């Protein structure tokens, strides 16, 4: 190895070390910053200075996560942000809003899938009327409908979208409009909620 090769090696090692330290510093500085939604700015979504959404007095429903959603209503209104409960696993998605009568400061629940799905939803053991919006992977609203309560019994009706979806968002009936979710809206799921 020549003297030039060693110098080049030291230079590359230094660049890698500085890059790692710099990235670690950025992550450390922003780790607890509620204004960083964690979304790709190339999508035209709120900047890092946009406050993360969420009622500071919300109480997380046991066994669920939470996530921010960002909605471009498509009707001239500005981007709207909300903090929702998140159902990420099969068990969480199966439970959903069963037996829930109070969202405890959340705007609703988003069911998140790893790939496109096409199955319907039902309201077994769900006493509160709900509205549901199925959202495609690109954020386009697939279908919106209202769902009626059903007792804890077999034979509850199934509500199905008109096509494949990646997310399903449930709110108390009529509240999707408050989130900006209507036909023609674009929904992005991701990022943190404001601290409680």
Image: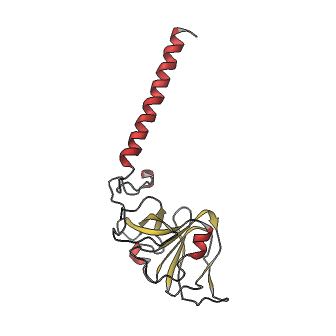
Percent x, y for residue 11? 47, 21
Q: Nearer the viewer, residue 195 or 166?
A: 195
155 left or right of 127?
A: right
Q: Nearer the viewer, residue 66 or 169?
A: 66
Which residue sits at x=64%, y=68%? Answer: 117
Which residue is at the far top?
A: 2
Q: Quadrant of the N terminus?
A: top right
Which residue is at the far front?
A: 62
Q: Nearer the viewer, residue 19 or 69?
A: 19
Above or below, comparing residue 3 to residue 29 in the picture: above
Percent x, y for residue 179? 41, 73
Which residue is at the far right?
A: 154
Colour scheme in use = secondary structure
Query: Which quadrant would residue 107 be assigned to in this image?
Result: bottom left
Above or below, comparing residue 142 to residue 123 in the picture: above
Query: Which quadrant would residue 124 be assigned to in this image?
Result: bottom right
Query: Which quadrant would residue 174 be assigned to in this image?
Result: bottom left
Percent x, y for residue 103? 43, 77
Total numbered labels: 0
Which residue sits at x=44%, y=70%? Answer: 60
Percent x, y for residue 69? 44, 65
Q: Nearer the viewer, residue 66 or 146?
A: 66
Q: Quadrant of the C terminus?
A: bottom left
């Amino acid at each position: 190895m020549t003297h030039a090769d060693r110098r080049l090696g030291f230079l590359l090692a230094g660049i890698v070390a500085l890059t790692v330290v710099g990235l670690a510093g950025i992550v450390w500085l922003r780790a607890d910053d509620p204004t960083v939604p964690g979304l790709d700015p190339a999508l035209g979504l709120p900047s890092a200075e946009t406050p993360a959404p969420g009622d500071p007095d919300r109480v997380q429903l046991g066994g669920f996560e939470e996530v921010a959603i960002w909605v471009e209503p498509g009707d001239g209104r500005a981007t709207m942000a909300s903090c929702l409960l998140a159902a990420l696993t099969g068990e969480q998605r199966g439970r959903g809003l069963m037996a829930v009568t109070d969202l405890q400061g959340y705007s609703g629940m988003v069911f998140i899938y790893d790939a496109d799905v096409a199955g319907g939803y039902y309201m077994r053991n769900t006493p509160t009327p709900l509205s549901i919006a199925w959202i495609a992977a690109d954020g386009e609203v697939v279908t919106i409908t209202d769902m009626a309560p059903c007792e804890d019994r077999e034979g509850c009706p199934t509500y199905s979208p008109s096509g494949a979806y990646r997310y399903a968002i449930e709110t108390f009936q009529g509240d999707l409009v408050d989130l900006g979710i209507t036909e023609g809206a674009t929904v992005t799921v991701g990022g943190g909620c404001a601290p409680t």
